[in-house]
Image (spheres, rainbow, N blue to C red):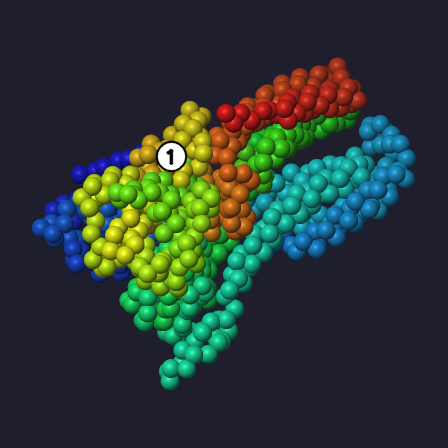
Amino acid sequence: MVKNNSKKSLFKCEVVHTLSGRIRLKCFGFEYLKDKLNEIEEKLNSIVYFNDVSISYITNNILLFYDPKLIDSEEIIETVEAVVASYSIEIHKAVKEQKDGLDRSKKALEYQPLGDKIKKIGVTAATIAYYGIRKKKGLPVEQLLNTKSVLDKFTTVPALVSLGLSRDILKNGVVSLIKDKRANEDTLTTTAIVTSLFIGGDISALTTILLSDIAELLTSYTMNRTRKAIRDMLDVGDQYVWKKSEDGQINKVNINKINKDDIIVVHSGEKISVDGEVVLGEGVVDQSSITGEFMPILRIKGQNVFAGTILKSGTLTIRATKVGDETAVSRIVNLVEEASNNKAQMQIYADKFASQLLPLNFSLAALVYIATKDVKRALNMLVIDYACGARLSTAAALSASIHTAAKNGVLVKGGNFIESLSESDTLILDKTGTLTEGRPKIMSIITAEDVTEQELIEIASAAEETSTHPLAKAVMSKLYRSGWKVPEHGEALVHAGFGVETIVGSKTVVVGSKKIIKKHDIEISSEIEKQVDKLLERGDSLIYVAHGDKLLGVLGVQDTLRDNMKKSINRLRSGGIDDIILLTGDVEQQAEIMTRKMSLDSFKADLLPEDKAESVLQLQSTGSKVIMVGDGINDAPALAYADVGIAIGATRTDIAVEAADITINSDDPLLIPQVINLSQKTMDVVKQNFATTIGVNTVGLFLGAIGVLPVFGCSLLHNLSTIAVVLNSTRLMFYRFERR
């Protein structure tokens, strides 16, 4: 049996041939996993269903012998695809490197220190200012060509400065033509510099270098800001830990001195600095920075904890299983840095257009000179440049778009993200802090007979007043907003993972889960049970409140949706987004309820940050153009790997902002569809500009070739067309965001 499939996902395998007990699969991802094939083969051979597994390095096929009584072909395909998918990040890196064709010399240019770039810009600007002012009014180009030798044009002070400052760009541009047989961004810059010097425009050459260096400076600045945010995140609370020695002594030591299998002790309110296993004690841990789950969870002996999380209450003794760069929080940082390094610097439409049509000018100049022996007509072919008008008009459109977005509180880090945004068809949403506000509120109050809401909240606040638990904050927020007061009470006793108790008057107050109510033998009436079931169905977290031996009532708490989020999702669908997916570290029940409530297409729950990033890569492997919207540290890897990452919210983390391509400075989700609409409008304007540039300059080339237009006329026509498309681009500055 032979099976063909035209859509070749890198995580999919196709059946090449199958017999009973034997199957051969074609796995497209193997092409990018040459150094991992032995490892994959060993993993599959260790599975009991398979008698023998072998992978061909040449054909990227895998041959499996199996027991048909234990497993069928569909299960085999699923098993192999799951193994391939576990290498999604490695595949992603290899694909990006192949697609980009970015060599080491180009990367070295990108990572020059900021100080070096600033010095280059200073030298270039000073040279332009000094020699540009002193330079006499230039002669017409045709006279200039006849009055100055080539050597003279390339040995002026501005020309020598141009060649010296651009030596790396010149080298990389030439290497790309020789090695890759294609022009790249540096080839275009090299051509502009050399052409300017050839016609005596040494100041023009310096101006080209200045603009190129400014663009590199902005890129480097953004990357340095990302690294700074990463360092700041790792430095907070991670310098020292309490290490327990073999004789039971506890000493404060530097985190760098902690090794695998060392025992550390973490107290209430402290940050956990290693990944490890709890060996003693119990405590409530806030894992929102890693998993995104807004509710702290109980951790007891035998369970795992992550570096970067906070122990809200209790004391934990932890055996370190991963330290330093191996911890979950460090893996997040590494993922962000890798994605930033490998993310393609997408060529905008003008660069693609210019790289394809740049040889046309030189070819036409040569043909015209051969046909007419007229240097002026040949020069017309170089004066009228498609690339110049296209690049300038496109830059104007993108700049106007970024300006308009900024006026409306949306920071776009580059024009390439405008293009990517306009092409996207899939949107991924984080839950906590993105779909929701990340601040739980009391949404329902169930009271027993003869108990008022005020009495219920005040009694609950007596126990919760000193707690930092999110549910406690919801209770206190309700109390303060209602203008009520906390009654006098005794010291609060925390039962980690269950609740809190204190004394009001002469009676014990118990506030917490149903378990702590049962533990105190407090009866729950059938009427309250019925109402509680309704709250559970809609996804509320419950707080039971008892005073003495009487249950006063139950509070239903929810992490409320952002205002206008539903409206935003509807607008996204009408704007061309086909799939809207929820990825969250929260539990499956909460994710399912949210997906149903917001009419999303699908969800994945209980995800760690690297799981979110892997989900993004899997979607991209099927051809989807992915937008990721998030707000937290746990979203940073997915934001970095997505085609466009959007950080939203006034409370978003610095690392999420630095990893994202677009930052929305407010909590208004309606800005998401609005910035997508703006991107689509922008690319429409870019296409209009392209059509104008091609049309007008083609006419100019034709008229210049037949001698109707002189060099000055061709130059004037070319520049007028550029002015026209720039004016067309400025219309985007008046684009209005609609937020109703």
State the residue at coordinates (60%, 24%).
735
Foreground residue among 10 and 704: 10
Q: Which amino acid does label 1 sit on?
A: Ile
Q: Which residue is denoted by mark 1 in the rendering?
A: 580
Task: Look at the picture and state if 617 lies above or below 712.
Answer: below
State the residue at coordinates (56%, 52%).
226
State the residue at coordinates (29%, 39%).
538
Task: Look at the picture and state if 303 lies above or below 425.
Answer: below
Foreground residue among 75 and 191: 75
- Decide if residue 58 is in sight here: no
| Numbered-mark total | 1
Task: Look at the picture and state if 393 lies above or below 428.
Answer: above
Q: Residues within 10 Å of mark 1 (few under 14, many from 20)?
A: many
- Name which quarter of the figure residue 404 lies in: top right
- Decide if residue 692 is in sight here: yes
Furthest residue in direction bottom, as rendered: 247
**Residue 263 position in % (x across, y down):** 38, 74
**Residue 367 position in % (x across, y down):** 67, 26
Q: Is mark 1 on a helix, strand or loop?
A: strand
**Residue 601 position in % (x across, y down):** 33, 34
- Pick the quarter of the image with the N terminus: top left
Furthest residue in direction left, as rendered: 69
**Residue 500 position in % (x across, y down):** 34, 59
Task: Look at the picture and state if 312 lies above or below 438.
Answer: below
Residue 115 as seen in the image, left or right of residue 616: right
State the residue at coordinates (77%, 49%).
122
Foreground residue among 242 and 737: 242
Foreground residue among 11 and 432: 432
